Amino acid sequence: MYGIRGGWTSRDEPKFSWAVGEREAGRLCGTGPIGRLAVLTGGPTTGNWGGAVDESTTAIRVITTESAPRAIGPYSQAIVANGMIFTAGQIPLDPATMKVVDGGITAQAEQVMLNLGAVLAAAGSGFDRVVKTTCFLTDLADFPIFNEIYGRSFGAAPPARSTVQVAALPLGVLVEVECVALVADRS
């Protein structure tokens, strides 16, 4: 018993319901009202196979802080969704002046990590909750210095990481780092 039925809500948004096998109940299965995730609920014993939208887990929150450089384009410093924080790439701009810091890879890597920490704090998290980083360097010869500075921010269980060399970064900087983190547990 597989199927999908379409319809309309009172707000003229498309609405869908699903009918699937019992093993599918509770799994993410598609979209309900446009832009919202739906999860299968119920089963043969309840007769409820409809897609239910949980607004608390599908809300998107934009993070903005003056403690990190403001966005220099059409993007957010970070987004919180489903208990996860997705940061924009942080480059070595001084948040007060919006100028690239002087001092080569050492100063730039230190500023990037300060900026990333400020964005995480504004989102209610910290380096201890980071699960993945992506690091961009314009010269992998800078990796040993960058790696030492980067490592100071993480404890005994550092996150998964990808580091790549790129041809160029915004404003001619040497390094950029973005991350995915968990929102801090408030319990």
Image (tube, rainbow, N blue to C red):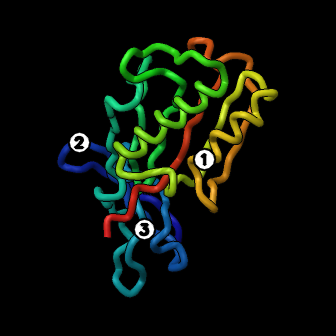
Q: Which residue is mark 2?
A: 12
Mark 3 to mark 2 CA distance (whole Å): 22 Å
Circle 2: element type: loop
Mark 2 to mark 1 CA distance (whole Å): 52 Å
Tell me what residue is drawn at x 42 percent, y 68 percent.
40
Tell me what residue is drawn at x 81 percent, y 27 percent.
141
Q: Is residue 140 above or below residue 184?
A: above
Identity of the amino acid at label 3?
A: Leu
Identity of the amino acid at label 2?
A: Asp
Tell me what residue is drawn at x 63 percent, y 62 percent.
156
Mark 3 to mark 1 CA distance (whole Å): 43 Å
Circle 3: element type: strand
Identity of the amino acid at label 1?
A: Arg
145 lies left or right of 8: right
Q: Between tags 3 and 2, which lies in front?
A: 3
Q: Between tags 2 and 1, which lies in front?
A: 1
Q: Between tags 3 and 1, which lies in front?
A: 1
Q: Which residue is mark 3?
A: 40
